Image (tube, rainbow, N blue to C red):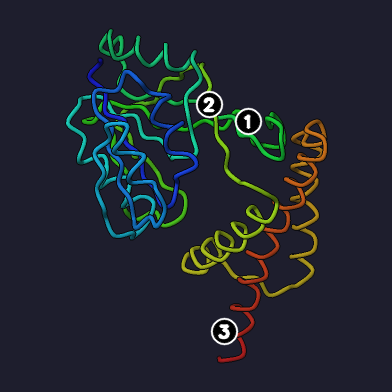
Amino acid sequence: MGNLSLVIITLDEEHNIERCIKSVPFAKEVIVVDSGSKDRTKQIAESLGAKFIYNEWKSFGAQKKFAAQLASCEWILSLDADEWLSEDLQDEIKLVVDNDGWGKNVFKIKRMSRFLGRWIKHGGWYPDWQTRFYRKTYAEWSESETIHETLKVKVTPSKLYGVMYHTPFDSIKDQVDSNFRYAKLLAEKKLKEGVRITNPLLIVIKTISKFLENYIIKSGWMDGTAGFVIAINSAHSYMIQMYTIYVSSKKELKDV
């Protein structure tokens, strides 16, 4: 077993956690940081030898930083429970650890997602490069990121070429529900940054543009029905985000 800690954050992941952990059989230790699962995530993780720790949820960045600080190994691989490694990627990561990184310290991994029964290779979904594998002294998660967590690195990441697999949504409803949650958070972030929208026509134009970007320009049509649904939902999420900003902007003007 190599000098590698597999670190995972979870919440009600009983359907995913076993596959995730088993895809890194060479990890010296597995650390699962959970924010309050009500299902069998804890029992499954511990049965596979993982250290299971509860930590109150604050943000993705804060949770991943807390989890990484628990790792005792020099190398850290950070995965979400709905992600797992291909055999090719397993071999690459083992070689990196066994050869002390060949002088490199941070690595990006390409992620391929499965949605509506097929692997998505267009529409901006692939290759979805993720910086997740690193020597612990060369990177740290940012606690300030409340939506999309960011790994702050001290060197330019190198690339691995095996694939990390991902199942982000269980259904169209699951994707739509996520759209509402994340669009609201993104709108709040942009409002704090000073973004304002006062012309409703801009919402219409940008929503249509977002669909065309994903479906035509980024070739989402090549992923069939799934590609169409992804493009529609991407535009829908963007519309919610802009409409939230628009309503807040109009309220500000009214209150002046």
200 on left or right of 110:
right
Please give the label number shown on residue 126: 1
Quickly name the residue at label 3.
Answer: 252
Q: Is the residue marked by circle 2 packed among few (<14), some (14-19), or many (20+) residues within 10 Å?
A: some
Give, as a three-letter code, the residue at label 3: Glu
Calculate the distance from the C-alpha at mark 1 to the C-alpha at mark 2: 8 Å
Q: Tell me the residue at 78%/33% (across/down).
A: 223
Residue 65 image point, x, y percent: 28, 45
Q: Tell me the residue at 30%/46% (across/down).
A: 33
Farthest residue in the bottom direction? Answer: 255
Q: Tell me the residue at 78%/49% (across/down).
A: 211
Q: Tell me the residue at 38%/30% (across/down).
A: 21
Instruction: Indicate the secondary structure of the residue bearing disc 1.
Output: loop
The answer to which of 249 and 12 lies nearer the viewer is 12
Q: Quadrant of the C terminus?
A: bottom right
Which of label 2 and label 3 is nearer to you? 2
Lower sequence index among marks 1 and 2: 2
Give, as a three-letter code, the residue at label 2: Lys
Up-down: is 77 above or below 174? above
Residue 245 image point, x, y percent: 61, 71
200 on left or right of 132:
right
Lower sequence index among marks 1 and 3: 1
Residue 123 image point, x, y percent: 72, 37
Calculate the distance from the C-alpha at mark 2 to the C-alpha at mark 3: 42 Å
Residue 161 image point, x, y percent: 51, 16
Residue 27, by quadrant, is: top left
Instruction: Indicate the secondary structure of the residue bearing disc 2.
Output: strand
Give, as a three-letter code, the residue at label 1: Tyr
Up-down: is 156 above or below 114? above
Calculate the distance from the C-alpha at mark 1 to the C-alpha at mark 3: 39 Å
Quickly name the residue at label 2.
Answer: 110
Q: Is the residue marked by circle 3 packed among few (<14), some (14-19), or many (20+) residues within 10 Å?
A: few
